[in-house]
Amino acid sequence: MDKTVYIVGHKNPDTDSVVSAVAYARLKELLGEKNCIASRAGHLNPQTDYIFNKFQVPHPKYLSNLTPKVQHYLKPLSGSVNKSVSVWDAINKMQELHNRVIPVVDDEGRYDSLLHFSAFAQNVITLLNPEKKHAISTSIGLIQKTLHAQPIVVHNEDEIFKGSILVGAAHTESFAEKLREHASENIIVITSDRESIHQLCVDSRIKLLILSSDYVMKKELRELAQKNGVSVLISPYPVAATSMMIAYSTPVSIMSDSEIKPVLLSDTITKIRPLLQASPCRCLPVVDEDNKIVGIISETDLMGEPNTEVILVDHNEITQALDGIENFKIREVIDHHRLSPLSTKYPITFINKPVGSTSTIITNLYKEYRVPVPKDIASLLLCGILSDTLILQSTTTTETDRETAEYLSNITNLEIEALGKEILEAGSHINGRSATDVIHQDMKEYTEGKLSYTVSQIEVGNTAEILDRKDEFFKELEFERRGRKLVFAALLVTDITKLSSILLIDADEKFAPYITFPKLEKQVYYLKDVVSRKKQLVPLLTEQLSVLE
């Protein structure tokens, strides 16, 4: 199966993170790469949602985590068989596909059972046990197909019945007695060129007469068989081979294992491991939500590499990445933040540039590959730059960001200042939103040695609306700090009209005395001209944290 590559930003994604994932996935598509899926590691904040709706671009796929699931290891379905086909046809299909198992499905492709050699061997031994009497479930049509027999007279071809097999090799009188003993059953007689047996079977109105080794019956007897409802087939095989092969004409659903229950694509590997160990074939069928078969997963599959890889955009710190990402290969990183102690076992593409936005980097990758930027993607990228640089006024803004924004503005015919104010306004409203929602809208976790902390950020038109509800925010920040065992949890509230910020911080009592920012009131600090979390605030916090290490 072709690898699925998720292109995804950090948890609690901001506009730049989501836009970068969508734009880079489109670039991959335009370059001819398949299965690169734009994703997001959280719900869209109001600003990002507004932008995607404004330019009518579908939201990227939501990934709650990357916990290893069945879908990450599943190989494509090589084949299945309908439950009405014969065991003979099913086994031939298995051999053709070089499979140890094959799923059995109904006419709509829904899972019925699993055919594996253990189940088949057990059922065949039961059927062929000479010490026990067993009727074989089959049909005239299945027997004919299994034997490659020539039909002479056929009645109710597709009717499934339970038949008792008798071999017409005894004296006529003795065989007539045997027919009388089985008179209440559906009798299948296999014989050769013995005309007296032919006559006796037709007169006795048996279910099916099979003539072995291409022997034929008299025409007048054929007419009587038609009248008496006796089906007649001519087998190319001798009596012994014909007798044995009839057992293989049973519908596969009877010989297959219905005790093996299917698993879902979304089931975790942890959940299915014990089920695999309990399965007699160490395999499990995989179905979708409609119970339609999509594949087979085995213990061997779990020993190989997953069929999923990841490209990280707008972050390179594992603490900010999707939970479970350590289970998958990181193919690329495209970012504009500080470097974290990220390590891989293999070389990867790593692009990190000191610009104000990952959207700036993605736009210039289009240029490098000489791929025209589609207008809808150009609109998103422009919004990503303007959002992350506060309309090119943040201290993180570079000349490259300004040039790139002008380039995208020309493509889209969108005016930078007007668009920037529009999207910042869309993300600045907090009325009606809970403190939990605001703090988690754009929250990032950082690690310095053994210490961890979080900094959330929101842009507003007036910091007073946050201060009026400060008790709600401090309660939520304390909850985050205690729950995650952090040294502190902070909310950076940036005033987009004054290009300065206030900082609400709930800190461990050991760290609180070392916070040196100008204090407005208890746990609230004023940060003049500070608008960038990554370039201005985090470096200052790192210095202050050094006293605890």
Image (cartoon, grey):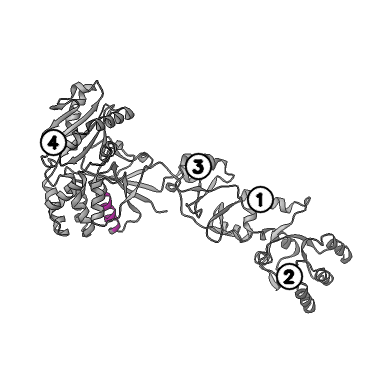
Classed neighbour count for the residue bearing mark 2: other residues with Cα under 10 Å, few (<14), some (14–19), many (≥20): many
Relative to 380, say whether 143 is above or below: below
Amino acid type, callout 3: Ile
Q: Do the numbered discs 2 and 3 sit on residues whose CB atoms are within 8 Å?
A: no
Give the CA distance from mark 4 to mark 1: 75 Å
Left or right, residue 517 beside residue 155: left
Classed neighbour count for the residue bearing mark 4: other residues with Cα under 10 Å, few (<14), some (14–19), many (≥20): many
Picture coordinates of residue 134, whole percent (x, y): 75, 54
Q: Which residues are magenta?
A: 20-29
Q: Quadrant of the C terminus?
A: top left
Left or right, residue 265 beside residue 186: left
**Callout 4: SS:** loop
Q: Which residue is mark 1?
A: 121
Amino acid type, callout 1: Ala
**Callout 2: SS:** strand
Picture coordinates of residue 32, whole percent (x, y): 31, 59
Residue at figure coordinates x 38%, y 40% from the top left: 327
Q: Which of the marked residues, 3 or 1, is nearer the chain's N terminus? A: 1
Q: Which residue is mark 2?
A: 231
Give the CA distance from mark 4 to mark 2: 92 Å
Amino acid type, callout 2: Ser
Classed neighbour count for the residue bearing mark 3: other residues with Cα under 10 Å, few (<14), some (14–19), many (≥20): some
Q: Which residue is mark 4?
A: 530
Q: Which circle, 4 or 1, is nearer the viewer?
A: 4
Q: Which circle, 3 or 1, is nearer the viewer?
A: 3
**Callout 3: SS:** helix
Q: Do the numbered discs 4 and 1 sit on residues whose CB atoms are within 8 Å?
A: no
Give the CA distance from mark 2 to mark 3: 48 Å
For this rendering, which residue is in front, 521 or 106? 521
Q: Which of the marked residues, 3 or 4, is nearer the chain's N terminus? A: 3
Q: Which residue is mark 3?
A: 272
Q: Do the numbered discs 1 and 2 sit on residues whose CB atoms are within 8 Å?
A: no
